[in-house]
Image (cartoon, rainbow, N blue to C red):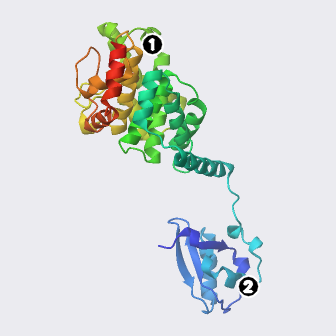
Amino acid sequence: MEEQSNFFTIDLDHLKAEVNVTFPFHLYVHNPQNETFSIYLHANSPLTQEKLNFLEFILNKGGKVAINKNQEKTFLTDRKILKEDIEDLQEIPEHEFIKRRRDRVEKREKQKEKKKFHFREQLELATKNNDYMPLIREAREEAMTLSYTVSHTVSLASSLAEKLLIKDNYINRIVAIAFHLANSTGMNDPQAVGDLICAGFLSHIGHTQMDLLFSQKPQLEMNDREKRDYRKHPGLSQHLIRKSGLIISERANRVLYQHHERFDGGGYPEYKQGQFIEPLALVLGASAHIMEYTSGKITGTPVALNVVITNLKNKTLSPGLELEFGDTIYESLIYLLDTNSSVSTVESKAA
Ligand SMILES: [Fe+2]
């Protein structure tokens, strides 16, 4: 099928068509219903009255006359028309967003040439210094290079990252760790990154509709009724997004709704298992759970990040620690702990 970008459309007036005139270029017609271009009159064939009538009929039905761009010069010369008179031949000025993104991509490439980012090293430093800003900054700068033309969710992710990933706080840590974890597991095509970032920022807005107690009380200290209510937050987040009219992709919606599902079916709200869980939801779930655990939101006592990851790696049962994020994430966590020295340092510090 001929590409739309190979053609430009013209008005019938541009042909100054008379019966039985011939043109040194082919005439095509564009069918707007299926966006196809079909040859209508070969070069040097007469435009008979019958053909002219039918061409007018096609135009009345919404079709358009088109010329192949490789015959642009022939057409303009023969018809004595200036390029400026054909709308389809005008250069579309570059949108400022496209230019801005190109500048960012160039800047990022230069940065990467100078200094390569190592997730494992940076995570180790973040733990040691309790400063996640380098990890957050890296996620922000990478997300800011996302294309504006992939989808609305990707554009939203890029904008949220630019405006929000500017300080070291709890949600930004979750988004940044999820971003780097997804990157290290190869789930990093632009749409996946966009879905994950949007889901990360929006996964806990359901908390705003819940009792303040759920933001303050450690999860292990909640009674059964409180636990049941707390488990409504993914659904409340999803409900709030739908109600507000905010448009995000279906996958971003699934990821935020499923971020507490666990690979063995032990999660919530739908007790999904393994392959029935959106893989990005497990990435976000792992990041959110690790951050919840380290900050003390689960047990009431903050725990060093490397200790949490070591326990995940060794599948050490600890109160409130969830282990079931699937093999891909598990292997990624093992990779993150491939330096024994750093683990022992933090373990002994935390002890
Ligand atoms: Fe959550």
Whether the residues at callouts 1 and 2 have beta carbons within 8 Å, the answer is: no
Task: Tell me which corner region of the image, top left, top right, bottom left or bottom right, holds residue 166.
Answer: top right
Task: Tell me which corner region of the image, top left, top right, bottom left or bottom right, holds residue 53.
Answer: bottom right
Give the x, y percent position of residue 115: 52, 43
**Which of these two is toward me, 288 or 255?**
288
Give the x, y percent position of residue 81: 76, 79
At 28% across and 25% down in the image, what residue appears?
312
Circle 2: element type:
helix
Name the residue type under label 1: Ser
Q: Is mark 2 within 8 Å of ligand 1?
A: no
The reply to whether residue 326 is visible in this rendering is: yes
**Residue 98 left/right relative to 251:** right
Q: How many marks?
A: 2
Name the residue type under label 2: Thr
On-image quarter of the C terminus:
top left
At 42% across and 34% down in the image, what residue appears?
121
Give the x, y percent position of residue 19: 68, 90
**Residue 81 left/right relative to 67:** right
The reply to whether residue 259 is visible in this rendering is: no
Is residue 261 depicted above or below 186 in this figure?
above
Is residue 67 depicted above or below 343 in this figure?
below
Density class for disc 2 (Cα within 10 Å; few <14, some 14-19, many ≥20) is few
**Which of these two is toward me, 138 or 11?**
138
Task: Tell me which corner region of the image, top left, top right, bottom left or bottom right, holds residue 73.
Answer: bottom right
Q: Which residue is mark 1?
A: 215
Is residue 275 depicted above or below 149 in this figure?
above
Query: Which mark is drawn over residue 77?
Result: 2
